[in-house]
Image: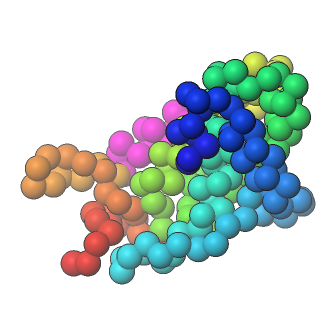
Amino acid sequence: AAARMALPLGTGLAAGTLRVLARTQLPGPGPEAGMIPGPRRDAGPHLPPGCTGTEATLLFPVLLAEARRWGLPERETEELLPAAERCLTWLRNTVGDGAYLPDPQPGGPVRCETQAQAHRAALLGADLLDAYGRPGGTGLRQWARTLRRAFHDDFWIDGPRGDRPAAARAPGGRPVPHLGAP
């Protein structure tokens, strides 16, 4: 996240961060192929710990696309593009035919913030793939539209101050309105 915030100052921090993350990316085959590993993080009393690896994996194509827009040299972008493609493949494989990206694992809760990160990764990743003539951009955009519609239907809840998204949906589909103690 810090590398993203520093982009107006230059792309060096982003490029270094992306290179480090690419070196830690899990090889395939398997369900975790393309994921960037990370520790679990406490999510409060209502949800199991979240996976920072999910966040890092979703951030990679976003950071690469944004760094490119801020002037990351084409050669560096092209060198990092295969790692971004593996992140996006992990995203699509993990979602499968569904609309949501579970975190930390399939069958787990569906977190609001994870869906937002996945949506952004899909859209910016699709732009990146298109810019380099790589396949997959259309499928990512279609999934992002599906996610957006499903999110509107399944996450928006009435609150005392108006409609808002639930923090998560429990494995059975019940909205979890907030992450704090009851």
For this view, does 104 lie left or right of residue 158?
right
Instruction: Give yes or no for residue 149 being in the magenta stretch.
Output: yes
Query: Which corner quadrant of the image does residue 62 belong to?
Result: top right
Compared with 42, 133 (above or below) is above
Residue 87 x, y percent position in the rendering: 74, 48
Q: What is the chief secondary structure element of the magenta stretch? A: helix
Residue 94 x, y percent position in the rendering: 68, 56
Residue at 43% across / 72% down in the picture? 43
Compared with 38, 166 (above or below) is above
Residue 55 x, y percent position in the rendering: 59, 55
Compared with 156, 182 (above or below) is below
Residue at 70% across / 25% down in the picture? 68
Residue at 56% across / 64% down in the picture? 103
For this view, does 167 lie left or right of residue 133?
left
Taking depth in this image into account, of 181 and 15 the one nearest to the observer is 15
Query: Which corner quadrant of the image does residue 141 belong to?
Result: top right
Taking depth in this image into account, of 19 and 121 the one nearest to the observer is 19
Colouring style = rainbow
- Give, as a single range, the part of the protein colored magenta: 142-154
Taking depth in this image into account, of 78 and 28 the one nearest to the observer is 78
Residue 124 x, y percent position in the rendering: 62, 31
Instruction: Give yes or no for residue 68 being in the magenta stretch.
Output: no
Question: Is any atom of residue 62 visible in this view?
Answer: yes
Q: Residue furthest front?
A: 9
For this view, does 135 lie left or right of residue 160?
right
Residue at 81% across / 57% down in the picture? 25
Give the quarter of the figure containing the C terminus.
bottom left
